Image (cartoon, rainbow, N blue to C red):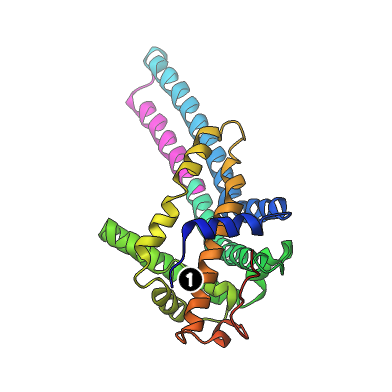
């Protein structure tokens, strides 16, 4: 039994009726807490540091031109460059601290946001969700979620560093890990990846085309981002995430009906067949 992109997308639109702005708020908060805020702060602080360093460097160069006129020898130049070196080291240390903070936020907060957002979109399909669902990733076995997604992302990154194409394949092999953890946060990372491999077996290419079908939407986002202060991507997320949730629900319930997956393992009594649209 195969799925059709058009049906998944139509179901996504239906599920967003009367819930679009709530979904927009969920996606916006998830994006901000997953690292967007710290990224903006890091960028702004980096710009301030580089600007300050440039101005100080310019002033020092101007002063150094006048040193010979005041009888200073080469040791004065050494002091100038020593000061510059110390200033650069201090700035590098501050930027490193901010970068480390950004990484930690993405790992520990971003993981919970990704799982909470996935849970929201899956449960929205059954009219069984609210804004607080976004934070469910913090409430249920948070550290297991963090560890599972960290290792999964690490695997995908290492494969991408070695070979680009296998890295993409690996990313689609683990396409459903976030959704599986949103259904059952007690799943180990190993088991979540195993189930995801089973659900995507023979379909990774089709899922890739499914994601690629949003290309024109993303192009429109890129063109209009300056009009929306960079929020155009967030306006698109409810639709994309709803469609991905539809795909996961189909793949999950198909595996359950085929006896390949025990619904109890995902905390489900039986397949959650969506209402007829």
Label 1: state its secondary structure: helix
Asked whether, in this view, residue 201 is left or right of residue 139, the answer is left
Taking the spot 49% from the left edge, 77% from the top edge, the residue there is 254
Which image quadrant: the C terminus?
bottom right
Mark 1, other Cα within 10 Å: few <14 / some 14–19 / many ≥20: many
Q: Position of residue 144 (x, y in %)?
A: 54, 77
Q: Position of residue 220 (x, y in %)?
A: 51, 37
Query: What number of labels is visible?
Result: 1
Which image quadrant: the N terminus?
bottom left
| Residue farthest toward the left in the current orientation of the protein | 163
Is residue 82 inside the magenta stretch?
yes
Q: Quadrant of residue 27?
A: bottom right
Q: Nearer the viewer, residue 133 or 276?
A: 276
Asked whether, in this view, residue 81 is left or right of residue 23, the answer is left
Is residue 54 inside the magenta stretch?
no
Q: Nearer the viewer, residue 244 or 172?
A: 244
Query: Is residue 72 in sight in this rendering?
Result: yes
Asked whether, in this view, residue 128 is left or right of residue 187, the answer is right
Q: Quadrant of residue 268?
A: bottom right
160 in relation to 262, above or below: above
87 in relation to 103, above or below: above
Q: Nearer the viewer, residue 55 or 176?
A: 176
Q: Overall secondary structure of the magenta stretch?
A: helix
63 in relation to 187, above or below: above
Taking the spot 46% from the left edge, 66% from the top edge, the residue there is 3
Q: Which residue is mark 1?
A: 177
Q: Which residues are magenta?
A: 72-94
Q: Position of residue 217 (x, y in %)?
A: 50, 43
Taking the spot 28% from the left edge, 62% from the top edge, the residue there is 166
């Amino acid at each position: 039994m195969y799925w059709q992109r058009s049906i998944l997308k139509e179901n996504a639109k239906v599920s967003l009726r009367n819930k679009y702005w709530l979904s927009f708020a969920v996606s916006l908060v998830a994006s901000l807490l997953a690292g967007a805020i710290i990224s903006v702060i890091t960028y702004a602080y980096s710009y301030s540091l580089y600007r300050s360093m440039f101005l100080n460097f310019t002033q020092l160069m101007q002063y150094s031109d006048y040193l010979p006129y005041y009888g200073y020898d080469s040791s004065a130049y050494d002091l100038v460059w020593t000061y510059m070196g110390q200033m650069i080291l201090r700035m590098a240390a501050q930027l490193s601290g901010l970068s480390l903070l950004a990484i930690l936020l993405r790992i520990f907060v971003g993981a919970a946001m990704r799982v909470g957002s996935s849970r929201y979109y899956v449960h929205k399909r059954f009219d069984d969700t609210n804004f607080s669902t976004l934070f469910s990733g913090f409430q249920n076995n948070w550290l297991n979620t963090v560890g599972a997604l960290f290792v999964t992302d690490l695997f995908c990154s290492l494969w991408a560093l070695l070979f680009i194409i296998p890295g993409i394949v690996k990313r689609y092999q683990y396409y459903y890990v976030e959704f599986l953890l949103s259904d059952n946060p007690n799943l180990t990372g190993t088991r979540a990846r195993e189930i995801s491999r089973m659900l995507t077996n023979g379909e990774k290419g089709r899922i890739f085309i499914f994601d690629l079908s949003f290309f024109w939407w993303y192009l429109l986002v890129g063109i209009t981002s300056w009009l929306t202060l960079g929020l155009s991507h967030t306006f698109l997320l409810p639709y994309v995430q709803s469609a991905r949730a539809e795909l996961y629900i189909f793949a999950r319930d198909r595996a359950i009906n085929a006896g390949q997956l025990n619904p109890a393992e995902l905390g489900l009594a039986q397949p959650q067949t969506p209402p007829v649209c």
